[in-house]
């Protein structure tokens, strides 16, 4: 039984301690919102308002669930088909590998199993045509890192294809379609993708701790129309609750049928494994799937700058929640969610440990080797003292089997993707796929060739997290998000680190282009300082 008084005291105390700035929570049971309240303020600076359940927040990747729901509406109308090749809707469009690209379907796009790399950016063009341009100009550059349907790789850019295909088959902009087919029927009256509309309502602002340790509001608001289907929706907690109620009730909301039960079931069914255990262990169509202490769960989170939002549903129990905050210090949000989930489901609170099973030692020779993630670098699997071992970014982690082909070391999950190959081709670490990699032992780096690489690289004119490259003592060093790491050369122009794979391409008209994650992001360089 959920103790509301104790819950409110806990949140209010955290707000007073500045562990949150503003937070809003709504609980759902059946077809109703049974509780909704806001805590804290929209900003720590002048003009901050008290947060209510109607306050707007950036919902980040919960936008992907909106996009998947929109696609299912158009599938029901007969305008889109989940299993028709994407290229058949786009005459003249060619992926980097034509043969693999012809296999990609909307089902792959919505389940993040296209085999294309992940990327994303907080700032980008604002004009309505930006989504079309991004699809045609950027996505064809992405190099495949796996065959379609083989591995799940959460993706902030390729999924925008789903929103663009909705535009293609209807002749209307994505934002108009979401407004007409989702927001209006579900009475999500304040929800929008338009920053100019959002600013006319109470809007929770993002925050940052500055160099002096002071918490302040950020005064650059994220905006990128080309990424709207992936992560740039804005909604209130009560609006999100309406959306959640529709999913809890097989497509019904307040007498309106948005989707058929079959469409909702398809979205909630795992389309792929993420090779993790329990919560969010799979992915459906625009929703994570899995189990929380035995209860079936579908959910999606959203993080953008300092916003952190959760929509979590337990369909078999008919309950769920929507929680949004505009800043949290990282010390207690999961603990709060764990308490909420446990008390809603009436199961014990605290961490859930996976059961240990006897490993399939006969498979270990297939697993041993080096693997490369274009986003996270190199990982090595070996066997020592009758123990399967992972070496990752300087750490050595002994692995314990929890399922066939799935291992854990504390909070690190390692899954080996099943296939018929003599040696395992893919493994997945905490949801990030790695492909088997054979290093060229004959390669000897020529550090003098790196002279053009140092500089500052930005993905867009407004980029608050640029990449800085410098060369020091015959080492190429990369700084991103505040941490500098040494990059290991793999070839004359490619390097790998814990930030993944980077490659330098000659521009011809100035500094080189830095390609991060197999063209997941392309950074334009400025001259070395």
Image: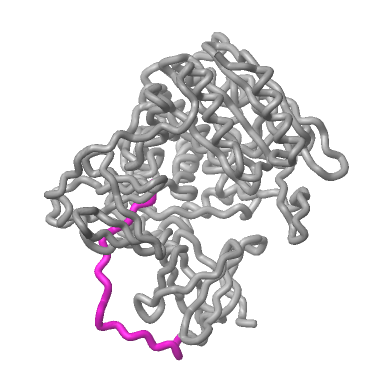
Which residue occupies 53% across, 84% down?
A: 472
Residue 100 x, y percent position in the rendering: 27, 53
> On screen, 527 above or below 357?
below
Which residue occupies 61% across, 46% down?
A: 304
Which residue occupies 52% across, 53% down?
A: 120
Which residue occupies 64% across, 26% down?
A: 25
Q: Which quadrant does the N terminus fall into? A: top right
- Start and end of the magenta stretch? 431-449
> On screen, 81 above or below 405?
above
Q: Which quadrant does the C terminus fall into? A: bottom right
174 sits left or right of 438 in the view: right
Q: Please say whether residue 282 is visible from this viewpoint.
A: no
Residue 441 x, y percent position in the rendering: 25, 79
Q: Please say whether residue 104 is visible from this viewpoint.
A: yes
444 drawn magenta: yes
Image quadrant where residue 371 sits: bottom left
Which residue in the rendered view is the most extreme toward the top? 255
**Of residues 208 and 235, which is closer to you in this image?**
208
**Of residues 344 and 376, which is closer to you in this image?**
344
**Of residues 207 and 345, which is closer to you in this image?**
345
97 sits left or right of 13 in the view: left
Which residue in the rendered view is the most extreme toward the front? 385
Which residue in the rendered view is the most extreme toward the bottom? 448
> On screen, 96 above or below 446?
above
510 sits left or right of 373 in the view: right
179 sits left or right of 381 in the view: right
Residue 337 x, y percent position in the rendering: 55, 30
523 drawn magenta: no
């Amino acid at each position: 039984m959920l103790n509301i008084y104790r819950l409110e005291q806990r949140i209010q105390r955290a707000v007073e301690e500045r562990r949150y700035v503003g937070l809003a929570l709504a609980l759902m049971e059946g077809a109703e919102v049974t509780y909704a309240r806001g805590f804290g303020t929209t900003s720590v600076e002048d003009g901050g308002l008290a947060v209510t359940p109607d306050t707007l927040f950036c919902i980040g990747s919960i936008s992907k669930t909106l996009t998947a729901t929109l696609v299912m509406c158009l599938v029901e109308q007969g305008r889109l088909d989940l299993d028709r090749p994407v290229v058949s809707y786009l005459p003249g469009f060619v992926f980097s590998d034509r043969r693999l690209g012809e296999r990609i379907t909307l089902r792959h796009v919505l389940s993040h199993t296209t085999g294309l790399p992940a990327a994303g950016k907080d700032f980008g063009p604002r004009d309505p045509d930006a989504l079309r341009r991004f699809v045609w100009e950027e996505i064809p550059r992405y190099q495949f890192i796996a065959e379609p349907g083989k591995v799940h790789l959460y993706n902030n850019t390729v999924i925008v294809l789903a929103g663009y295909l909705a535009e293609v088959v209807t002749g209307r902009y994505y934002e108009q379609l979401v407004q007409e087919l989702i927001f209006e029927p579900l009475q999500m009256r304040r929800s929008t993708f338009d920053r100019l509309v959002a600013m006319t309502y109470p809007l929770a602002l993002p925050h940052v701790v500055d160099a002096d340790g002071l918490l302040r509001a950020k005064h650059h608001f994220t905006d990128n129309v080309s990424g709207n289907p992936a992560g740039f929706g804005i909604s209130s907690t009560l609006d999100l609750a309406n959306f959640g109620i529709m999913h809890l009730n097989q497509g019904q909301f307040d007498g309106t049928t948005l989707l058929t039960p079959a469409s909702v079931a398809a979205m909630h069914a795992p389309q792929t494994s993420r090779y993790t255990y329990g919560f969010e262990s799979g992915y459906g169509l625009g929703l994570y799937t899995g189990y929380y202490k035995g209860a079936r769960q579908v959910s999606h989170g959203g993080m953008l700058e300092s916003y952190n939002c959760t929509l979590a549903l337990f369909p078999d129990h008919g309950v769920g929640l929507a929680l949004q905050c505009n800043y949290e210090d990282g010390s207690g949000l999961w603990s709060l969610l764990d308490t909420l989930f446990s008390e809603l489901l009436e199961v014990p609170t605290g961490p859930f440990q996976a059961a240990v099973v006897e490993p399939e030692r006969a498979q270990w020779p297939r697993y041993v080797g080096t693997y490369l993630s274009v986003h996270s670098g190199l990982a090595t699997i070996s066997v020592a003292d009758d123990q399967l071992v992972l070496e990752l970014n300087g750490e050595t982690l002994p692995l314990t089997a929890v399922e066939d082909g799935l291992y854990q070391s504390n909070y690190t999950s390692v899954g080996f993707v099943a296939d018929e190959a003599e040696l395992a081709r893919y493994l997945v670490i905490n949801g990030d796929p790695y492909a088997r990699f054979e290093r060229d032992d004959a390669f000897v780096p020529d550090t003098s060739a790196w002279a053009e690489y140092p500089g500052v690289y930005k993905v867009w004119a407004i980029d608050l997290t640029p990449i800085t490259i410098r060369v020091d003592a015959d080492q190429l060093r990369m700084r991103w998000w505040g941490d500098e790491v040494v990059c290991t050369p793999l070839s004359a122009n490619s390097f790998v680190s814990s930030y993944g794979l980077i490659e330098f391409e000659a521009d011809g008209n100035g500094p080189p282009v830095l390609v991060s994650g197999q063209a997941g992001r392309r950074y334009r360089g400025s001259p070395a300082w």
